[in-house]
Amino acid sequence: FWLNLNKNKRRLMHPILKAFIPTANLIQKSSPFACEVVLHDLSHPQRSVVYVAGDVTGRKVGQSFDHLVSEVLNSKNFKDDYVANYFFTKDEKLVKSSTAFIRDEHGEIIGAICVNVDASVAKSLFEMAGNKIIAKNEGKKLKKEQKLELVGFMNEKGIFNIKGAIEVVAAKLNVSKITIYGYLDQLKKKRP
């Protein structure tokens, strides 16, 4: 199977990796935030990128997999062929990333799929929501309904997609993490 890099270059892509292209497109289109999905062919480390859906980090077909080595393989959280929800900055953006290896029918690692999400927008919303809580309610004790409304607002804005957000919101609202999870369950039940 050949993949067009541009009009003048063509490159062999492993059929198993080619089968991941629809998955990469689905993930990229399903994200509520700017999302990029990168497929790597690890048999060509110096030009491992064979497909990119979306644009967050500026990855291009034909680039190397050096990011995988520095962020993924060296991570203490890398087990069972994947690492999820690690963060790095690229061009002043906070990027939330997850990477999984792809194996062939013999169990050999042939590639990787990386999902990069621009978490800068969610982080800004989270900070704004936190400031809104403090500014509007400083010195006031919030009622349960008000807390539920704030949690609903933050949930709609994707705040809880950020690692550690539940803990921060719980501290700001002076409740436990379990209470926040309870509020989220209540909100889910209210949805039509």
Image: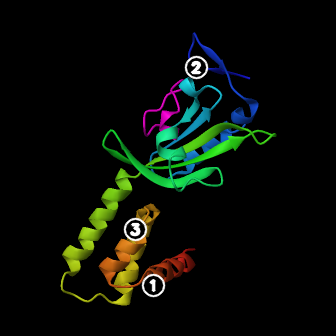
Residue 58 magenta: yes
Residues rendered magenta in the picture: 55-68
Question: Distance between the Cα atoms at labels 1 and 3?
Answer: 14 Å
Q: Is residue 61 visible?
A: yes
Quadrant housing the N terminus: top right
Q: Amino acid at mark 3?
A: Ala
Check disc 2: other Cα within 10 Å, few if <14, some if 14-19, many if 20+: some
Say which residue appears at 40% left-offset and 81% top-offset.
148
- The one of 23 and 79 positioned closer to us in this rendering: 79
Question: Distance between the Cα atoms at labels 2 and 1?
Answer: 51 Å
Which residue position is annotated with label 1? 179
Q: State the mark number for residue 165.
A: 3
- The one of 114 and 79 positioned closer to us in this rendering: 79
Q: Position of residue 71 (x, y in %)?
A: 47, 45
Say which residue appears at 70% left-offset and 32% top-offset.
18
N-terminal of the pair, mark 2 or mark 3, is 2
Give the main secondary structure of the magenta stretch: loop
Q: Is residue 150 visible?
A: no
Say which residue appears at 18% left-offset and 86% top-offset.
139
Q: Position of residue 67 (x, y in %)?
A: 48, 37
Check disc 1: other Cα within 10 Å, few if <14, some if 14-19, many if 20+: some
Apparent side of residue 166 relative to residue 63 in the rendered image (left or right): left
Q: Relative to 55, is 125 above or below?
A: below
Q: Amino acid at mark 1?
A: Thr
Q: Quadrant of residue 144?
A: bottom left
Identify the element where label 2 is drawn.
loop
Q: Relative to 57, is 75 above or below?
A: below
Which residue position is annotated with label 2? 5
- The one of 128 and 169 positioned closer to us in this rendering: 169
N-terminal of the pair, mark 1 or mark 3, is 3
